[in-house]
Amino acid sequence: MKRLFFILIAAVTVSANAIERVSFDELQAGGWERLHGQTVQITTPLIVCGTFRDSIVLAPERLYVPEERARGLAQGDSTDYYRLVRHNSLLKIRLVCAPQYDLNLGATIKNLKATIVGTRALQTGRRPAWRNYRPRKQLPSLGDADVVVCSANIQNFFFHQGGYATKRNTMGQHELQTLKVASALRHIRADLYALCEVEKGESAPAELTAKMNELADNDQYAFVRTGKTDGDTISVGFIYDQHVLRPFGKLLFAYPDSNIYCCRFALQGFEQLQTGERFVVSLNHLRSKRGTSEESLKKRMANVDMMLAMIRRAYSDSTYTDPDILMIGDFNSYTQELPIQAVVEAGFRDMLMRDDSLGYSYSYKGECGYLDRVFATPSMALQVTAAHPLHWNTDYYYSAAYYSKYNFKGNRIPQHATGNIRKYMSRAARRNLLFRYSDHDPLLIGLRLGK
């Protein structure tokens, strides 16, 4: 009798611990409701599309923002847009789990074991087993380029420790941010850096240039002087390799006054020292998508009108005459949105759609797409050898807890730390020095001038 009792208990235990193996398609076909509250093993490999403090967004494929690929959206046809919205919503799975600080977007999770807690919602107390996607240090091939341009949003780089929309408010945090940004830009080895979200004025670009020269152990880099006073306002700026390029012409802003948004749109000419070939760069940072969709679209369309007017003004008064214009920056607009289509209709060629249409430079809520852009006039397009994103930022886990652990926010760095900040960094922080210095991926553009 006693033996029979233990056999019965063992059978019940095995039955309770039995895990049902299901595919993603089986879950979609009613399995979420049928297996609610049970632990399952999903046989379909899942891709990590987003990471948050207490959860991970998973899907059978990498998800793109509907505005990135919806056909006809710029012409007011929303049919394809709503199809893609539904497509993404049906594929997204939310996995509630403890923070996984070393889990990158693009990682693959196979045979996931978790408990179903709702429709497309899972929960696990275990660390999922994954094959991680590691962004590589290798740079994309740019063909036979003789000039490399890097367009990068460096996420509120301010000379004054805090600054607009940032919480880096100790000297240690600021020193580490400077080291990360300078190390990443220096490793890219571009000849021209066109930077968005840098503090207005000359102190911030001067500090970043000095750090890059310190890493290069010479005076290789210089920045284009703006003539603006410092202020708690985001702006744009240029840093260039003075052994390869030199500026020509006057640096122009969208407005000559001190308007808070005037420094987000700039125009500057550059000349290749070896050949004397010239090109003009229009660097722009359009307004973000805050407020209602109608309000943000109206502001961004006004920004497009502003930057096109700035180019016309520069050429009408003969400040610039060279037809080779490269238009780059953070446009805060996906490929199928009106601001991007307006630039194309104005005669500019979309270099990213030509060379890397399946890429992305930004990720939000588990969906990725291009917010950063590369356009060229027809004559300039012939001299662009390639344009590609470099996934050093978007794919990396991002949270306050992550940076606390890896010393980015300075929790273990003395408040007034200066000098060799590396000695305060953990081994993991030093290993990841080039990665996640911003929330946008940089874009690399190869030029073969005079081609």
Image (tube, helix red, strand yellow):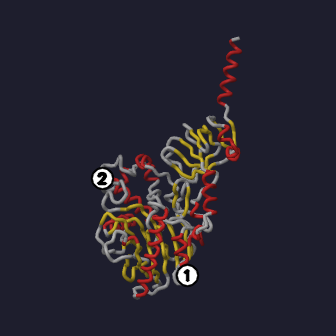
Q: Is 164 situated left or right of 289 in this image?
A: left
4 up-or-down from 114: above or below = above
Q: Nearer the viewer, mark 2 or mark 1?
A: 1
Q: Is 126 situated left or right of 174 in this image?
A: right
Question: Considering the image in quadrants, where does the C terminus appear?
Answer: bottom right
Judged from the image, the secondary structure of the residue bearing numbered disc 2 is loop
At label 1, the amino acid type is Pro
87 up-or-down from 2: above or below = below
Packing grade of label 2 (10 A; few <14, some 14-19, many >=20) is some
x, y percentage for residue 215?
Answer: 39, 64
x, y percentage for residue 421?
Answer: 35, 54
Packing grade of label 1 (10 A; few <14, some 14-19, many >=20) is some
Which residue position holds label 1? 378
On the question of residue 26 being in view, the answer is yes
Q: Is 164 situated left or right of 6 in this image?
A: left
| Residue at horizontal 36 percent and vertical 47 percent from the top | 411
| Residue at horizontal 40 percent and vertical 52 percent from the top | 408
Q: Determine which of the numbered discs, if any, sits on residue 299 in the image.
A: none
Q: Is 93 situated left or right of 403 in this image?
A: right
Q: Quadrant of residue 311?
A: bottom left
x, y percentage for residue 66?
Answer: 58, 60
At label 2, the amino acid type is Ala
Q: Earlier in the sequence, mark 2 or mark 1?
A: 1
Q: Quadrant of residue 273?
A: bottom left
Which residue position holds label 2? 417
